[in-house]
Image (tube, rainbow, N blue to C red):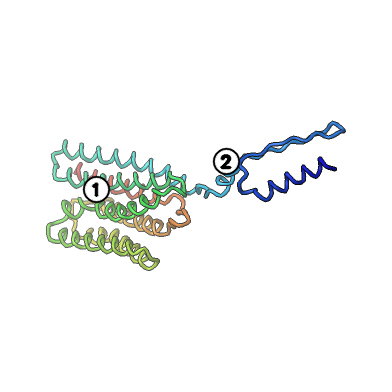
Amino acid sequence: MKILDEIREIFNLILEHSEDVSRMRFEARMKNGSSFRYSFDRQKWERELQKENLPRRETNQLINAILDVLGIGIAVAILVILVVFAAVSGKTEGILYYSISWALAILYYLFSALYNFLSPVHTAREFFFKFRSILLFLTLSGFFLPLYLIYLPANPGTGLMGGVLLLCVAGLYFNGLNTRGGRRMAAISGILLSWLSVIAIPFLSASFSLFEKMLVIFAAVLLSFWITAAFQSDHSTSKEPPAMNLFLLFASLCLFWFNLLWIGA
């Protein structure tokens, strides 16, 4: 019985100091030939426990990340095509505004991709989320720069551009409050910002066809859906609506077509 008492004392001692045990390994062989082994490595056990408790990347997050990468490629292609076509056709007044519009879109997609690709526990995600929210309003404002500052007469164009700046600042302010009410008001500011472009349609010259005007309306509708989806995102739980930026991609294509038709007119 002495051997068993020693074993019992050893195990009791291990249990008393279990928090300090770093590694343990033993093997017992029975008289009938059977045996059992046990090993414990605290570092390995803690790594496995950390993996189990780690928040998993949502499927929506991965889909949005892929769409963001696609968006970067499309925005770069649109920027190059519009600038080259404007230069070749002699409509150089549009080059600056196209560059600003689509450079902002590229930055938005880039920071959105970085946000979605990072693990939910990564500390940099919060920075990318906040900066993406800022770029959202800047991108939305930049999309219609050519419409307000080139395609429209000076008087209504300048007035609408003032409305754009006002709503952009309001959206950034409300979003910066970081409250539910603030985010709701920021979303409303973004939607109104999208629909200012529709107010501009009656002021367009007769050279713009009905189809071109419909492209502006389609873009405003899609951007409204995009804003609504964006402000349903919950950074605290890392949840985002599926394919959130798909609305932005289709709106980008509508605006690209609209601008390209003006260049070719």
Q: Looking at the picture, which amino acid does disc 1 mark?
A: Ser
**Mark 2 Cα-neighbour bin, 10 Å: few <14, some 14–19, many ≥20:** few
Quarter of the figure with residue 71: top left
Return the disc, 2 or 1, that comes first in the chain's sequence: 2
**Residue 250: % across, % down:** 36, 48
> Can you say whether 189 is above or below 94 in the image?
below
The residue carrying mark 2 is: 43
On-image quarter of the N terminus: top right
Task: Left or right? Give the position of 104 relative to 151.
Answer: right
**Viewer-proximal residue among 232 and 20:** 20
Q: Residue at position x 35%, y 54% from top?
A: 130
Name the spot of residue 31 as percent of width and height, x first: 86, 33
Pair 2/1: label in front: 2
At label 2, the amino acid type is Gln
User: Do tag 2 and tag 1 residues touch (Cβ < 8 Å)?
Assistant: no
Q: What is the number of the mark on residue 101?
A: 1
Residue 258, given in percent of the width and then of the height, sits at 26, 48
User: Helix, strand, or loop for circle 1?
Assistant: helix
Q: In the depicted view, which residue is nearer to us: 34 or 152?
A: 34
Instruction: Determine whether the residue tagged by mark 2 lies in a helix, strand or loop.
Output: helix
